[in-house]
Amino acid sequence: MFRLTRPLFNAVKRTTGITGLNVHPNPLPELAKTYKSTLDVLANIPETSVYRQGVEALTRHKLNIVESAKGDVAAVEQKLDEGQIEQSLDVATDELSLASKMLEWKAWEPLVEKPQPGQWEYAGQQTTASSS
């Protein structure tokens, strides 16, 4: 299999082919930095938060993929399976933004007002505010 080194890969890739998504000159360090920033924000959310548990596990997994690739962009794209590396960077940036908003919103805290009866009923399933 033909593997492109980073300089050759960047010389060949001039466009992502996606409107509004430019080719990043050095995406892997930026992706690793974004994942680490997300983990830093998540550290401020209680460990019992389901959001933190899920996002932290996924982010650590993705960071391990990036760090173990040793600069091989094609290998990272294949293992992440999120399309082009620029798309993965876009997803990571969005997750970092969401993590910051979740920290601001304190979504893990109990509701200020009790939900209306029937508010949490979906497709014939009944739940209570305490079980959701």
Image (tube, helix red, strand yellow):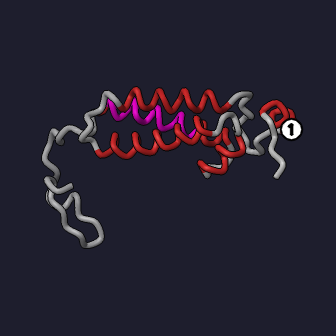
Residue at position x 48%, y 43% from top?
61
Relative to residue 123, is residue 76 depicted above or below?
Answer: above
Magenta residues: mostly which secondary structure?
Answer: helix
**Residue under pointer 1:** 12
Query: Residue 14 appears at what percent x and percent y?
Result: 83, 36
Magenta residues? Answer: 90-104
- Residue 47 horizontal/vertical position (percent): 27, 37
Query: Residue most toward the bottom?
Result: 124
Q: Nearer the viewer, residue 101 or 42?
A: 42
Indicate the quadrant where residue 26 lies.
Answer: top right
Secondary structure under badge 1?
Answer: helix
Q: Is residue 67 left or right of residue 132?
A: right
Q: Position of residue 126 (x, y in %)?
A: 19, 67
Identify which residue is drawn at 74% across, 28% down. Answer: 25
| Disc 1: CA contacts within 10 A as few (<14), some (14-19) or many (>=20) | few
Left or right: where 31 falls relative to 106: right
Q: In the image, what residue type sits under mark 1?
A: Val
* Percent x, y of residue 131: 17, 56
The foreground one among 59 and 116 is: 59
Is residue 92 located in the magenta-colored stretch of the structure? Answer: yes
